[in-house]
DNA sequence: AAACGGGACAACCGCACACCG
DNA sequence: GCGGTGTGCGGTTGTCCCGTT
């Protein structure tokens, strides 16, 4: 029918579909009447047998197919073959533009819910849609294009508003420019402004970098944007009621799941502000990852909602090698990593940051703020910190080898102060608001609790990406030797002090 | 013309839920 | 309530085809 394999050709040189026989169907491999079940491509004969069976007995009871028809295929395989290829109502051929758009829309709303998407697209199968999407994603990522067209982003956001019974933003908020590219995990130059890092800090113009260069940022680089602009935008997040089963892979950020997942599995993102010391890895974890959530929930060293780094997670797997999952608000909010039902907001607990910054001025966002004179100061301070760390490290390492802070820590706080405060207004009742995580208070707490002099707030993933210890030098070496860091450096490093940063980077390497 | 790489597609695998006895 | 079976779903892998070098 839909497929004719070589074995098919061999088996059915005269096209035996019209008179399917078990012998024909099962003669093509290591199969037999009661022998091992056949795998691999289906033959026309097998298709015919299956069609005949279904016609006679109807769908379902797939395991009976083998028994009754002698087809050497497991029931599961039969079901799949029927559903994906033999069903009479299947629509064959390429997706129409209309269907393509519909898929994008649905994905923006549902995420990787292929079956549900298929239900919205008559004649199409989940497998078909899934393959299409995966191919498309790869293609677009390679091309540096946004996964979701802006209009669909907008549409998704808008459609979600009424059904979002969580904390939602007002319509105006939804239309805040900051929210626009939520699903655009690429950072095209035209949208880079949405980072709004101090509004102008990273303006391509101000930074004297070619706007187009940002187009080269791979999908992974969307993190900066995604975390900045999309996370607070819960309104976009899918509120589709959780399907009957809860899967760890379910993503609350339908698109982020894929994009960030790809991004992070490809390598944690390191951003360098040029001062050598900002390294960030954003790690989302599934809210079902109780181990991680409970771990950091009980980790006294962490700020509320921050992600436990390595606490109780002995994984030695590099963060960038891990499959990363985003928290899902599709599920009950109470199931969010917050230890208490009264604190259902996921916040950024899953967001880990490796950030290092000069010590005291958390309110000044030393690393990203243009007011910060101190790249050199930071480096000097870093040097000092390293010295201190050698002393303190022995003590620190064992108990708090990694200091966790909310994403972007003080720089974020500085950069998005206003916005987060605004969000905080709405989110605070939920316990851990995003802004609270980013707030100076949180950092203060963190600092007082954990930060060693020098404020080397190295945010590490819960996967143990980095630890602060006495081997700082080697850590830095690792950072700088990593391609993604170099990429990030290329992307972000030159923004402030291009030449300076490059030289520093060079030196560091 | 051969080698290579990527896209498209089909199929499998593992997991989880639903149902039933 | 429990275990077995059936089914559905999402992720991953394998294979073929085609364009490029």
Image (spheres, coloured by chain):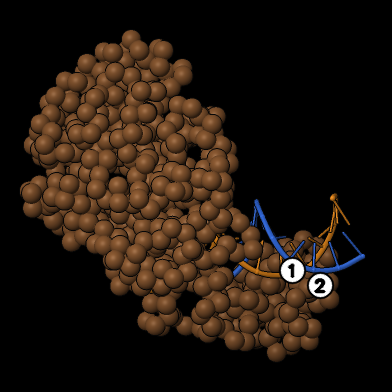
Chain colours: A brown, B blue, C orange
Label 2–label 1 contact, CB within 8 A: yes
Image height of B12 relative to A7, above or below: above
The chain letter for the residue carrying disc 1 is A
Q: Residues within 10 Å of mark 1 (few under 14, many from 20)?
A: some
Residue furthest to the bottom in view is A18
- Say whether residue A75 is visible: yes
Q: Earlier in the sequence, mark 2 or mark 1?
A: 2
Q: Which mark is residue A64?
A: 2
- Say whether residue A319 is visible: no
Image height of A53 relative to A261, above or below: below
Q: Which residue is mark 1?
A: A75
Question: What secondary structure is marked by label 2?
Answer: helix
- Residue C13: x, y in percent? 54, 54
Q: Residues within 10 Å of mark 2 (few under 14, many from 20)?
A: some
Disc 2 versus disc 1: distance between alpha carbons? 7 Å
Q: What residue is shown at x 79% (from left), y 83% (from top)?
A: A57
């Amino acid at each position: 029918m839909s497929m004719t394999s070589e074995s098919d050709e061999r088996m059915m040189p005269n096209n035996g579909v019209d008179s399917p026989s078990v012998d024909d169907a099962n003669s093509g491999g290591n199969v037999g009447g009661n022998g091992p079940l056949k795998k691999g491509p289906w033959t026309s004969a097998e298709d015919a047998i299956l069609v005949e069976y279904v016609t006679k007995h109807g769908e379902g009871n797939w395991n009976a197919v083998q028994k009754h028809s002698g087809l050497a295929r497991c029931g599961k395989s039969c079901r799949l073959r029927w559903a994906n290829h033999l069903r009479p109502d299947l629509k064959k051929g390429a997706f129409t533009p209309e269907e393509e758009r519909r898929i994008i829309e649905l994905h923006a709303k549902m995420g990787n819910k292929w079956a549900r998407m298929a239900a919205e697209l008559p004649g199409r199968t989940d497998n078909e849609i899934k393959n299409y999407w995966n191919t498309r994603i790869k293609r677009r990522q390679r091309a540096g294009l946004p996964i979701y067209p802006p209009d669909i982003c907008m549409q998704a956001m808008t459609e979600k508003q009424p059904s979002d019974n969580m904390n939602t933003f007002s319509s105006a908020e939804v239309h805040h420019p900051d929210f626009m590219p939520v699903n655009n995990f690429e950072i095209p130059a035209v949208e880079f402004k949405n980072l709004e890092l101090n509004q102008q800090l990273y303006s391509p113009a101000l930074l004297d970098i070619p706007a187009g260069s940002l187009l080269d940022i791979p999908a992974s680089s969307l993190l900066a944007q995604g975390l900045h602009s999309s996370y607070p935008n819960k309104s976009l997040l899918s509120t589709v009621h959780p399907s009957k089963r809860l899967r760890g892979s379910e993503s609350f950020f339908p698109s982020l799941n894929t994009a960030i997942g790809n991004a992070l599995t490809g390598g944690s993102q390191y951003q360098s502000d040029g001062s050598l010391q900002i390294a960030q890895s954003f790690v989302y974890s599934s809210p079902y990852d109780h181990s991680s959530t409970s771990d950091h929930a009980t980790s006294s060293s962490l700020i509320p909602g921050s992600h436990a780094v390595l606490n109780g997670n002995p994984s030695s797997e590099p963060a960038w090698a891990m499959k990363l999952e985003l928290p899902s608000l599709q599920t009950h909010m109470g199931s969010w990593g917050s230890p208490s039902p009264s604190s259902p907001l996921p916040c950024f607990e899953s967001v880990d940051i490796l950030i290092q910054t000069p010590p005291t001025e958390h309110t000044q966002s030393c690393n990203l703020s243009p007011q910060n004179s101190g790249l050199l100061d930071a480096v000097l301070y870093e040097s000092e910190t390293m010295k201190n760390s050698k002393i303190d490290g022995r003590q620190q390492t064992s108990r708090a080898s990694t200091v966790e802070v909310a994403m972007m820590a003080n720089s974020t706080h500085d950069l998005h102060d206003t916005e987060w405060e605004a969000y905080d207004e709405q989110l605070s009742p939920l316990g851990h608001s995003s802004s609270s995580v980013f707030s100076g208070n949180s950092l203060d707490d963190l600092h007082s609790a954990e930060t060693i002099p020098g404020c080397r707030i190295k945010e590490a993933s819960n996967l143990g990406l980095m630890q602060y210890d006495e081997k700082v030098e080697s850590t830095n070496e690792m950072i700088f030797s990593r391609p993604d860091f170099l990429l990030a450096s290329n992307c972000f490093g030159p923004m402030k002090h291009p030449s300076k940063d490059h030289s520093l980077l060079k030196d560091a390497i």
